[in-house]
Amino acid sequence: MAARVIDGKALALTIREGIAKDSAELHARTGVKPGLAVILVGEDPASKLYVKNKQKACDAAGIYVDEHKLPASTTQDELLALIKRVNANPLVHGILVQLPLPKQIDSKVILDAVSPLKDADGFHPYNMGRLVEGMALFTPCTPKGVIKMIESTGVAIEGKRAVVVGRSNIVGKPAALLLLHRNATVTVCHSKTKDLPAVCREAEILVVAIGKARFVTADMVREGAVVIDVGVNRLEDGTFVGDVDFGPVSQKAGWISPVPGGVGPMTIAMLLDNTVESAKRTAGLQSR
């Protein structure tokens, strides 16, 4: 029996409608309009498209966008000076620095300079540390979206065997922590994992984020598993595929997310959610 597809685009739309309502109510009640600073350095086509999509989503959700487009020649000191100004701007509740940055700029230095109180991406060490304790002010957007997608299936996370393939600070590690906080038994796999297919077959929930096209094949997947594909890989013909071999795996899994139309839209929705929640904290309201 074919897996049921987790429509991230439809789920994100529903979530964004709720965020827009929250944003409007916050503004009406307190006069605070959620604000997101968006910083783009250079002319990378993919980055420009990502930023454009995020701006459109903000507009639809009633979020003010403080836009900063800088030339590729921008120095690290110039970017740090901008972040210092944005950190101090009371109209901004979240800051997004679009990656990748030009080679002359150290991304870690820049991300660490963002105020942890405005860290909408959830990348700051302060928030990563709090995430370990289950108390992050901002949860990284993609892992947060992954959890929402799993929850949307109705499959309980508690007590399940979960396997995360990939250990990046952006997706793999925080996704594992979020699953652990929900009482799953979690294994994190990486390039040094022995007999990776066997480990993956143990997973009732399988999250794949390694950046290798169609790496996870049907023989690596447990019958009826929930499979979340975080990967986005561009093929030579210009099409995009995930880290999971969707066709064959969808004949074995119970639930599966597609690429495109899966995790991507959810990541943007979680960015909006983080921004509105930050605005609520600024207004002295208890965030949900």
Image: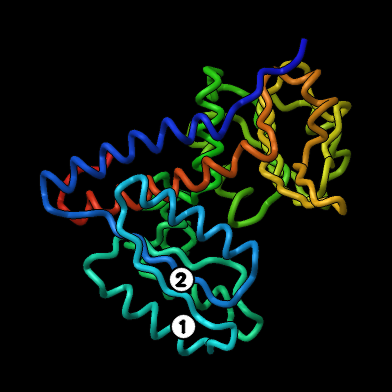
Q: Say what secondary structure mark 1 lies in.
A: helix
On the image, numbered disc 2 is attached to which residue? 39
Quarter of the rendering occupied by the N terminus: top right
The residue lying toward the viewer, choosing from 258 and 212, is 258
Residue 268 vertical placement versus 180 (above, below)? below
Res. 282 image quadrant: bottom left
Residue 92 on image: x %, y %? 29, 64
- Residue beneath the point at 18% across and 40% down: 25
**Pointer 1: what residue?**
79
Front: mark 1 or 2: 2
Q: Kindly state the secondary structure of the residue where label 2 is placed.
A: strand
**Label 1 is placed on what type of residue?**
Leu
Q: Residue at x 43, y 75 (%)?
A: 113
Q: Is residue 20 left or right of residue 73?
A: left
* Farthest-out residue, top: 1
| Residue type beneath disc 2 | Ile
- Quadrant the C terminus occupies: top left
Q: Is residue 157 left or right of residue 26?
A: right
Q: Are marks 1 and 2 in contact (CB under 8 Å)?
A: yes
Q: Residue at x 66, y 43 (%)?
A: 230
Whole-percent x, y for residue 286 in the image: 20, 43
